[in-house]
């Protein structure tokens, strides 16, 4: 059963990495600014998933705190840029 | 305790299934983000990454650590609660920003700003006749 678990963790890890590659392609292509903001937000979420998977692989609870911090900070950055695109300033 | 620990068979199968599901959903979401033609279609990809993909992978982590430590470990529920609170806000704001930018660029047809879907049949029920 450990081989099955190993295979599952590796599959999830490499699919999240492949998703990050495709999202970076959209970040470079994206014809408009809001496309790039969407890609950046997705990259933050994929980084958090990488930390959760590494916590699973190394059986260590310390990676959970890293994942929580990434989730918090990524949300704030996406929100700030979206507010700027909508209004022209972040805090009115 | 620095490697993947061995679990009883049922728990290992449950965690593996959740990991496979989560990985597949993240791949499908990113493929949608890359390949769909308009922005309003593209926003569905990250939506399923955030909800289903993160949900499945965080659930796998919760089950793994619960079985490993023989007590209910729900640390990852904090991350889930945080994502549930913030991801819809960011998505709605991003969609409104896209609508405002399309309107400012002078595209009057918000439902089809890139003109991909051609002439649609007129299905309105109110037909006003000039007096």
Image (cartoon, grey):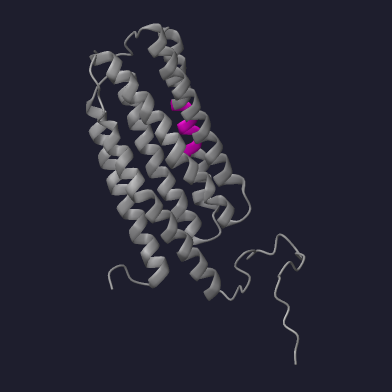
Establish if A43 lies above or below A64.
below
Q: Give x and y (percent) for residue B82.
A: 30, 44
In the image, residue A25 lies at what x, y percent?
53, 45
Residue A80: image location, x then y, percent: 33, 60
Nearer to us in this view, A67 or A14: A67
**Principal secondary structure, stretch drawn in magenta:** helix
Please say if B122 is above or below B16.
below
User: Does the rendering let one see residue B26?
Assistant: yes
Tell me if residue B93 is in the magenta stretch.
no
Identify which residue is drawn at 41% across, 61% down: B93
Q: Position of residue A57 (x, y in %)?
A: 34, 19
Residue B2 visible in the shown view: no
Give the quadrant of residue B63: top left
Near-viewer residue (B111 or A78): B111
| Residue A15: in magenta span | yes
* Region of the chain picked out in magenta, as a range: A13-20
Image-based side of B5 in relation to A26, left or right: left
Tell me which residue sits at (32%, 54%) in the image.
A77
* Labels in figure, total: 0
């Amino acid at each position: 059963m450990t081989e099955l678990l190993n295979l599952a963790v590796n599959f999830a890890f490499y699919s999240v990495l492949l998703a990050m590659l495709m999202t970076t392609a959209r970040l470079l292509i994206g014809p408009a600014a809001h496309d790039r903001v969407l890609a950046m937000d997705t990259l933050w979420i994929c980084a958090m998933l990488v930390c959760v998977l590494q916590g699973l692989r190394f059986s260590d609870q310390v990676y959970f705190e890293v994942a929580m911090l990434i989730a918090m900070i990524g949300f704030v950055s996406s929100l700030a840029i979206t507010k700027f695109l909508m209004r022209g300033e972040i805090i009115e | 305790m620095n490697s993947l620990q061995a679990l009883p068979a049922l728990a290992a199968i449950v965690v593996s299934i959740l990991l496979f599901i989560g990985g597949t959903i993240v791949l499908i979401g990113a493929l949608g983000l890359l390949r769909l033609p308009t922005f309003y279609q593209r926003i569905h990809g990250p939506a399923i990454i955030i909800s289903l993909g993160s949900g499945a992978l965080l659930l796998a982590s919760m089950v793994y650590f619960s079985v490993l430590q023989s007590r209910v470990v729900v640390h990852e529920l904090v991350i889930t609660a945080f994502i549930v609170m913030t991801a819809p806000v960011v998505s709605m704001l991003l969609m409104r920003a896209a609508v405002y930018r399309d309107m400012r660029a002078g595209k009057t047809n918000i439902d089809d700003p890139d003109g991909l879907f051609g002439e649609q049949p007129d299905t309105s029920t109110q037909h006003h006749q000039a007096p």
